[in-house]
Structures are given as structure tokens and as C-alpha cells.
Amino acid sequence: MFDSLSERLGKTLKNLRGQGRMKEDNIKDALREVRMALLEADVALPVVREFIEQVRQRAIGQEVAKSLSPGQALIKIVKDELTAIMGEAAEELKFNVTPPAVILMAGLQGAGKTTTVAKLTRWIKTHTKKSVMVVSVDVYRPAAIQQLETLATEVEAIFHPSTNKQKPVKIAKEAIASARRQFIDVVIIDTAGRLHIDDEMMAEIKALHQVVQPVETLFVVDSMTGQDAANSAKAFDDALPLTGVILTKTDGDARGGAALSVRQITGKPIKFIGVGEKTTALEVFHPDRIASRILGMGDVLSLIEEAESKLDRGKAEKMARKLKSGKGFNLEDFRDQLQQMRSMGGISSLLGKMPGMGQLPKEAMNQVNDKQFVTLEAIVNSMTVKERHYPDIIKASRKRRIAAGSGVQVQDVNRLLKQFTQMKKMMKKVSRGGMGKMMSNLKGQLPF
């Protein structure tokens, strides 16, 4: 997300380095470039105009602190204003009602609403420890109810059954009554996707909203539709009192126009963003952290939170002991590291949250491919337990068998073994206190 915007803004703000004071003349060109970068990112024009004017007013005539260059000072102003238009701080879900707290999910067709219901369920169960019931009132789309039932099983939610012969309002009322009897904390209602120009469908969701009185009414929208996402949210909010927005498919959105437009146009906060297809791929939307990501500063706080919630503590402690002793690191440990990385969204997601990664050359970033990690894992899985523990025994005939079992070439097996050997050497250097020397050797190999 924001790849093209980050690249464009990075180049623009670099041009202001070395100047002692910010004046209208020396930031005029920079703001023109920022404006073009935002428009190319499909940010709504009124939002762009207001943003540029706010930055211009704050920047002109501002003395640059001794520790900052004009470029750095302008970056701080841009970061502050990006944070402001996206909503300042993360907005929490409201559960301060007599249980069950009802969450009504609305959205356009094809926005990924049902999958988002499952993601939100998992997030609530994991982060608030509340029990969740899900119910589908989508009586129009074939297999919509069955899809939610399958996802409910995956995220271990209580599923309230319904059929396409029932009325949506009746289904919802029965689900809430059932949740109350079972002392369930939260009920999430998955509604049918609709177009905001469809009067009949909008009337249906209005009636549903009036009956269930949800504590949260969340609009689910595809971020790849850019500023149209903000316009759709505004149209829905005019008909339905929304409390927030969930942006889906942000992992495939290089522009980020929706994230920068939604709050300003609708006045409603973005509460979550979907960052992948798995039910674990949902993140709280932190405007300040997102602004840092856009400007290539990384998002270390989210990285730490993700590590704490998704890494296997037992495996991490076992690895720490091996690292300390400098002994016993084998291919099973190597595979565990790959799996842990994938559980955190893959290498691309991790790099996107690390400071300075936006400055890496495109060629270097293009070489980072999560599919390679899946292949490496398949190769290790094709080995016997003995081969994983004693890689030195893997000779020509074994390599051919492993390659055939994992659907790769023998040279791919050789490449993995070479990478493993390099990683093992690195582990030994760290265990001997040679971190400084190791980093200094690595520095010459990195493309920055």
C-alpha cells in the first residue's frame, strides 16, 4: 500500500535538503510535486487542495531547527497533516452496551464483506477475549450463508443458521435473541452487498438498522477503488448512520487514495484495514503509523505488536537458546523461521513496516518474493527428519529425490542448502559476540 505515493514523495522532499530556511519560492515546486503525487494516488481533489493549503501555511517562513534540514522540517509538517486528514488517532470499537453488542456490516457488492466479518471476529476474540456470534442476512447471493458458516468454523465463532427463504429482519432478531440466551458478548450481522443507488435494498438495510440498533455500523469498501471508495461511503452514510469504515484489499493497492480521502469526505474514521486474504490479515488503522509508512519512516510499533501476537513464544525461546549456545541450528529451525515470517504477513509486509525500506532500489525490492519462501518450505518438507537434522548427508541421490518431491530443480535444493549454511555461520558469529563485525560485513553487501 502507498508504494507509488511513498516513492514520489520521497524524491520530492529530498530536493529540499541543504537549504537554511523554508520560503515560498523554495517550497513552491515541492508542493506542486506533492500535489501531483496525491492526485496520482487517486486522492479526492477537495482533500488534495485542503491538504496542500494546510502544509503551505505551516511551512512558509518556518525557521528550521538546528537539528533539521528544510527537507526534514517539511517532512514533519507533511506527516502531521497526513495524520490529521486520516483521523489523528486509532478509533476503538464500542462495546459499552448491555450484551450482546451488535455490529452491522454494510457495503457494496464484491468488497469482501463476508471475509471481513470472519477477520473482525478473529480480531475481537483475540484482542478482547469476547465471545462472538455471526449471522448472515444475505438471502440473495447463492451460497453466501454457507460461506459465512465455513469461515465461522475456521475462526471458531458461534454461527447462527439462516436460510434464503427467511426475511433479513427476522433472521437478525432471532440471532440477537439466541445470543442473549447464550450470554454471547458480540453479534456480527453480515448483510447483502448492495449498490447505494438501489432504493429497495437501501430501504431494507435502513429497516434492519432500526430494528437491531447496532452499537457499530461499519462500511466495508475496496480500497482499490480509490476516491470512489470515499464517495460510496459518503452515500451510505447519508442513508445510514455509519460509525466507521473498513478498507479491504489494501495489500493490492499501491496508491492509497481511499485511505487519504475517506475521513475527510465522510467524517467517519477508518477503523481497520484488510492486508491479505487470510482471516488473520486485519490491522487496526493507526493514522500516525500509516503517515510514517507513506513517508518511508516505517511502522515499528505495529511490527512489535504483530510479533507479540503472532509469533510462537515457545519456538522463539528455543531458538534464543540455540542462538546463545551456537549449536544445533538445523533445517527444521530454518523452516520454523520461514513459517513465523509468513504468519506475520510475509517478508513484503515486514519490509513495508521497517524504516528506510522505501529508499531501497526497486530492483532489490522486486527480488523479495514471498512465493520463494513457500518453495523453500516445500523443499524442507520433502526431506526426512534425519536429513533436516543432519544436512551434510544430503548428497546427489537425496537431492534428486527431494527436488522431485517438492516439484523443483536440483539447483533449487542446492540454493536452499547454501542459504542454510550461510544462516548457520551467521548464527555462530552472533553467539560468539561478533554482532558488530557481522553487521559491518553485511553493510558492504546491502544496496544502500
Image (cartoon, rainbow, N blue to C red):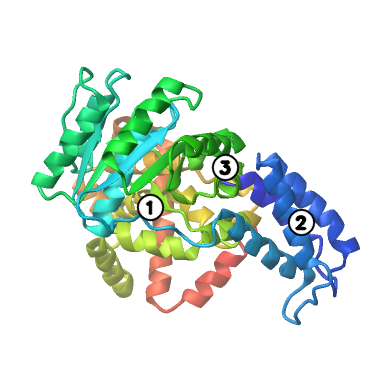
Say which amino acid is labelled 3: Ala
Residue 93, position as x, y percentages in the image: 35, 55
Secondary structure under the numbered disc 1 in the rendered image: loop
Res. 237 in view: yes
Q: Earlier in the sequence, mark 1 or mark 3?
A: 3
Front residue (pair 202, 307): 202
Which mark is on residue 53?
2
Residue with the mark numbered 1: 344
Spatial distance from mark 1 to mark 3, Cα to Cα?
A: 24 Å
Q: Earlier in the sequence, mark 2 or mark 3?
A: 2
Note whether 202 is above or below 387 in the view shown. Answer: above
Q: Nearer the viewer, mark 2 or mark 1?
A: 2
Residue 277, position as x, y percentages in the image: 38, 38
Say which amino acid is labelled 1: Met
Secondary structure under the numbered disc 2 in the rendered image: helix
Q: Earlier in the sequence, mark 2 or mark 1?
A: 2
Residue 209, position as x, y percentages in the image: 33, 37
In the rendered view, does 353 fall on the left or right side of 11?
left
Q: Residue at x 67, y 47 (%)?
A: 47
**The N terminus is located in which quarter?**
top right
In the rendered view, does 205 fall on the left or right side of 133?
right
Secondary structure under the numbered disc 3 in the rendered image: helix
Q: Residue at x 40, y 33 (%)?
A: 112
Say which amino acid is labelled 2: Glu
In the rendered view, does 311 fall on the left or right side of 235?
left
Residue 105, position as x, y percentages in the image: 35, 38
Q: Residue at x 46, y 76 (%)?
A: 434
Residue with the mark numbered 3: 258
Q: Rate crowding at label 3 as few (under 14), some (14 to 19) or many (20 or more) other CA atoms within 10 Å.
A: many
